[in-house]
Image: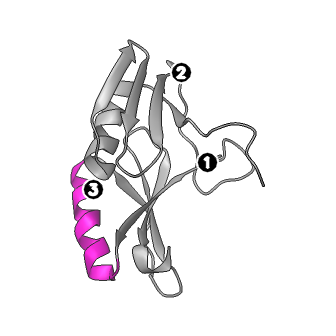
């Protein structure tokens, strides 16, 4: 199907665009570029641009709720072809300020769920299943 517009970026509301862009730059690569006080863009190598917009009264999603303040979207990152590789990436994202949302058994799953420092869900995925 032909496109009627070209994809530009994913925009994420957050309380601190500079801090959240720095977090995702360490996770996915790239260098954040401040556009103004309330807007920072991160061009991730081989991925879409992520833009971070200041929202003073930001309320993070309540994962995994769907009835109120649902996650609305999340980001997936390939973290390795084995769980050992995912474990190594997990250690790094936790050190950067992520927190686990779902680290129960990996059986039957090809991902793990975390919250970024602003509370948005994201997943570390087995790249072999992507």
Q: What residue lies at 61% left-to-right and 57% top-to-bottom?
A: 64
At mark 3, the secondary structure is helix
Q: Nearer the viewer, residue 66 or 28?
A: 28
Determine which of the numbered discs, if any, sits on residue 94 in the image.
3
Residue 33 vertical placement versus 62 (above, below): above
Image side of residue 33 versus residue 120, left or right? left
* Real-space Cα separation, disc 2 to disc 3, in angstroms: 25 Å
Q: What residue lies at 49% left-to-right and 45% top-to-bottom?
A: 120
Q: What residue lies at 57% left-to-right and 53% top-to-bottom?
A: 63
In x, y percent, where is residue 85? Answer: 26, 75
The span shown in magenta is 81-96
Please tell me in which quadrant of the rendered image residue 40 appears. Answer: top left
Q: Is residue 114 magenta?
A: no
* Real-space Cα separation, disc 1 to disc 2, in angstroms: 16 Å
Q: What residue is shown with label 1?
A: 71
Residue found farthest to the front: 2
Image side of residue 38 versus residue 13, left or right? left
At mark 1, the secondary structure is loop
Q: What residue is shown with label 2?
A: 57
Q: Main secondary structure of the magenta part?
A: helix
């Amino acid at each position: 199907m032909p496109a009627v517009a070209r994809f530009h970026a994913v925009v994420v509301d957050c309380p601190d665009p500079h801090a959240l862009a720095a977090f995702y730059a360490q996770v996915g690569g790239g260098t954040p570029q401040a556009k103004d006080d309330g807007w920072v863009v991160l061009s991730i190598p081989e991925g879409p641009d992520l833009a971070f917009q200041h929202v003073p009264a930001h309320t993070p999603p309540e994962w995994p709720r769907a009835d109120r303040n649902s996650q609305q979207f999340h980001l997936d990152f390939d973290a390795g072809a084995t769980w050992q590789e995912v474990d190594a990436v997990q250690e790094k994202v936790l050190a950067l300020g992520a927190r686990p949302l779902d680290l129960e058994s990996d059986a039957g799953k090809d991902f793990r769920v975390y919250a970024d420092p602003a509370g948005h869900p994201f997943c570390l995925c087995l790249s072999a299943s992507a």
